[in-house]
Amino acid sequence: MGWLRTSVGIALMAAPGAPMRLAGTESPTGAVLLLMRTIGIRDLVLGLGTVSAARSNETSDARRWVKATLASDALDTVVSLAALRSIGRRDSLFAAALALGFVCGDLQALRAASEQQSSQHVP
């Protein structure tokens, strides 16, 4: 999940208008491009933090980073659904479904980190 999030972050920073064009928006505004780059920076930091923590010997670090990404993705899901009236049903549901997909991945990563931590504590 860390590498996927890192890749998404880099893509959003490099081509912030691509998601808007895929959604059918003809020309994203400067504010939208800034928002997409900001989201890209957030994803890059969360992704690299997760990768770095997963490579360390401290499983508690990995769990902490995965919990942070889980919180971010869960809030993205809620905010996307809350924006139904302002951005439209299709875009709201698409954004929520995308974020929910990441929530599922985060939960799987958290489960794996918990199992790894449990196995390290067994004599």
Image: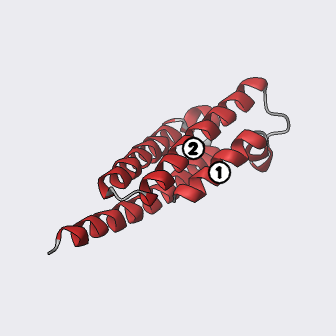
Q: Residue at x 24, y 69 (%)?
A: 120
In the image shown, does 114 or 87 lie closer to the viewer? 114
Check contact, mark 1 vs mark 2: CB within 8 A.
Answer: yes
Q: Residue at x 72, y 48 (%)?
A: 11
In the image shown, does 113 or 36 lie closer to the viewer? 113
Instruction: Please determine whether, in this image, residue 15 is positioned above or below residue 34.
Output: below
Can you identify the residue that label 1 sits on? 8
In the image shown, does 72 or 13 lie closer to the viewer? 13
Quadrant of res 3: bottom right
Tag of residue 120: none
Q: Is residue 22 left or right of residue 43?
A: right
Give how far across and how far down residue 52 sits, in percent: 48, 52
Q: Quadrant of the C terminus?
A: bottom left
Can you identify the residue that label 2 sits on? 43
Which residue appears farthest toward the top when viewing the image? 31
Give how far across and how far down residue 105 sits, in percent: 46, 62
Give how far across and how far down residue 76 sits, in percent: 49, 42
